[in-house]
Image (cartoon, rainbow, N blue to C red):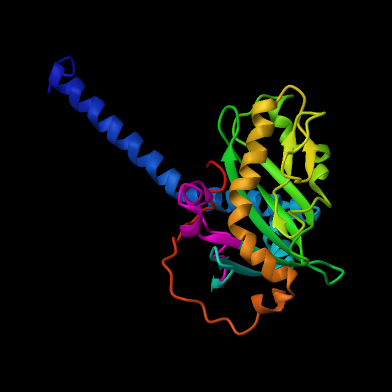
Amino acid sequence: MNKNSNTYQILYAAIMVLLVGTVLAFIYMALKPKQNENIANDTRKQIMSALHIAAPEDAQVKEMYEKYIIQDLLVDSEGNIVDSAKNVAFDVQMKKNVKLPAAERKLPVMKCRMDDGSIKYVLPVYGAGLWGPIWGYVAVSEDGNTIYGANFSHEGETPGLGARITEQTFQDLFKDKHLFVDGQFKSVAVLKKGQKTTDGAEQIDALTGATITSRGVSDMMADCLAPYEAFLKRLQGGGGAQCTADLDPAPIETVESETNDNQPE
């Protein structure tokens, strides 16, 4: 075949594209398990950060996570436990979950036992900032009311402004705030300094120069935590023990996922 002919050049290009595509596909498949594990470990670190647990080296993240997280739960909007399979809460795709009506959402709960024996419940949150998704984890004490810690992340907020939601100084403002006022659920509000809530909810100051991102955090907290009201009230009534005993969950359809979708891949 004439190497200078159009037919030869087209065949040569097609073969090279096929070979390169095959090699790239092989590399992708070979690396995918490691990539998925890295994503999962990053999520585990965020959850542990909400619990004020210092993350270890990457090789030990999963081991430490499983040391503290003693149970995964899915609850419904009435506070009932509907599933308690391993990783059932960790694997919920919050990006899709928050688009459902509150009464239809899967409500993930990660139950943690701290070194002092106290119990915390980690609840994931997901919302929108100025430039893209924001998400996080809120750890609630076993009284079902007091925030023990929080961790927030983002996809593309402005460095030095909205991106400061990842800073510990901002996240620590949520510690010891309450989700109920006079027995009524009132999510913690994030407001400009000097502003006051109109419903009696507790509040923290918004980030300077990041009004929209701060509002996004406030809205995310309200939207994602409100469906847990019945569950949290059960904890307040001493129902925490029921989270580990006599489970007879109703059958539900769960989504199996290799990665946690609380953050972009």
The N terminus, quarter of image: top left
Residue 174 in the image: x percent, y percent? 79, 46
Residue 71 in the image: x percent, y percent? 65, 71
Residue lying farthest to the top in this orientation: 4
Q: Is residue 163 magenta?
A: no
Q: Would you say residue 91 is visible in this rendering?
A: yes
Q: Is residue 100 magenta?
A: yes
Is residue 262 left or right of 61 when viewed as pictured?
Answer: left
* Number of numbered markers: 0
Q: Would you say residue 83 is visible in this rendering?
A: no
Residue lying farthest to the right in this orientation: 116
Using the image as rendered, state which of residue 86 and residue 30 is in the foreground. 86
Q: Residue at x 74, y 49 (%)?
A: 150
Residue 48 in the image: x percent, y percent? 74, 55
Using the image as rendered, state which of residue 33 and residue 264 is in the foreground. 264
Q: Residue at x 78, y 66 (%)?
A: 143
Q: Main secondary structure of the magenta part?
A: loop
Magenta stretch bounds? 84-108
Q: Residue at x 84, y 68 (%)?
A: 115
Using the image as rendered, state which of residue 208 and residue 169 is in the foreground. 208
Measured along the vertical axis of the image, is residue 80 above or below residue 188?
A: below
Is residue 67 left or right of 118 when viewed as pictured?
Answer: left
